[in-house]
Image (tube, helix red, strand yellow):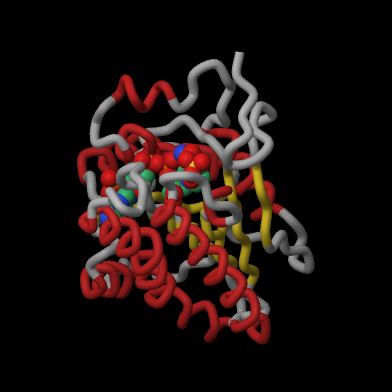
Amino acid sequence: MNKRTVLVTGATSGIGLATARLLAQHDFRLIVTGRRKERLEQLSQELSSLTDIHYLVFDVREREAVQNAIQGLPEDFATIDVLINNAGNAHGLDTIQEGNPDDWDAMMDINVKGLLYVSKAVIPQMTSRKQGHIVNIGSIAGKEVYPKGNVYCASKHAVDAINKGMLMDLNPYGIKVTAINPGLVETEFSVVRFKGDEDRASQVYKGMQPLRPEDVASVILYTLQLPAHVNISDLVLLPTDQASATVVRRA
Ligand code: NDP
Ligand code: 8X3
C-alpha cells in the first residue's frame, strides 16, 4: 500500500507534535503546520530520515492564508489522505461575567473557525477522490461544561457538532470522520490558558497522572490503522484518575 499523506495542524507542541513523531514511524508522509516556524523547521529535520515531510506556517484564523498555503502545496504533497484538525487552545479560565472578550474571540476563531477553514481547504480533494479521513481533536469539554470553562467548552461543543455534521455530509463520499475527545493531557495547553504562568499551569495536574500527548497520539494512530470498513466516529479518552470534567482523583 502506498504511504498515506497526513496533514497535522498544531504540530509544534503537545498532541500534534507527538502525533507527527509517531506517524513518521508508521508509514505516513507528513505535512505539519503551526505558527512557530523554527519549531516546524526543527521537526522537519528531526523526522526527515524517517519519512517525507513538508511544513506550512500559517495562523488557522487567517482564512486566505490557510487556503493559499494548502493550495500551494508542492505536487508530491498536494494529495492529502488524512487531515488531523488538532490546532487549538483554551485562553483564560474565568466566569462568564469576568471573561475577556479577546479570549472568547481567540477560542472561537481558532478552535471553531480555524478548524472549518482548514477543513474547507482540504475536503474538496477528498470528495472528488471519494476517499479520506478527517480526525477532529475535540475534548471532554465538548461533552460537558465545567465552571469557568464556558466559552472554551462552547468551542469544543461546536467541534463535537461539526464532527457529527461532517460524518453525515461526507458519508456519501466514503470519507471517515473521527472525533477524539481527551480529558486532561499535560502539554503547553495550561501554560497557554494561563498566559505563561507555569506555576498555575502545573497545579492543574497536581496529585494526579494526566494523559501524555503520546497517549493521545497512539489512539489517533489506532484509528488510522483500522480496516477501510471500520470508523471510530467519536471517542472519549480519559486518564484513569479522571472520571468527568470535574471529577478527578488526586493524591
Ligand atoms: P498545545 O498548546 O501544546 O498545542 C497547541 C497547538 O495548536 C500548537 O502546536 C500551536 O501551534 C497550535 N495553534 C494554536 N493556535 C493556533 C493558531 N492560531 N494557528 C495555528 N496553530 C495554532 O496544546 P495541546 O497539544 O494540548 O492541544 C492540542 C488540541 O488538543 C487542542 O485543540 C486542544 O483544545 C485539545 N485538547 C487538549 C487537552 C489538554 O488537556 N491538553 C485536552 C483535550 C483537548 P503554534 O503556537 O506554533 O501556532
Ligand atoms: C482540555 C481539557 O478539562 O482542561 O480540553 O477542558 S479541559
Q: Quadrant of residue 155?
A: bottom left
Image point (54%, 56%), residue name: 142
Image point (56%, 27%), residue name: 210
Image point (29%, 62%), residue name: 60
Closer-to-camera residue (160/151)? 151
Q: Is residue 200 left or right of residue 68?
A: right
Closer-to-camera residue (132/2)? 132
On screen, residue 9 above or below 116: above
Q: Residue furthest top?
A: 251
Q: Position of residue 59 (x, y in %)?
A: 24, 59
On screen, residue 47 above or below 116: above
Q: Position of residue 170 (x, y in %)?
A: 60, 80
Q: Quadrant of the C terminus?
A: top right
Tag count in the figure?
Answer: 0
Closer-to-camera residue (187/231)? 187
Q: Is residue 36 left or right of residue 17?
A: left
Image point (22%, 68%), residue name: 62
On screen, residue 110 above or below 26: below
Q: Position of residue 45 (x, y in %)?
A: 32, 37
Q: Quadrant of the N terminus?
A: bottom right
On screen, residue 143 above or below 92: below
Q: Is residue 5 visible?
A: no
Q: Is residue 152 visible?
A: yes
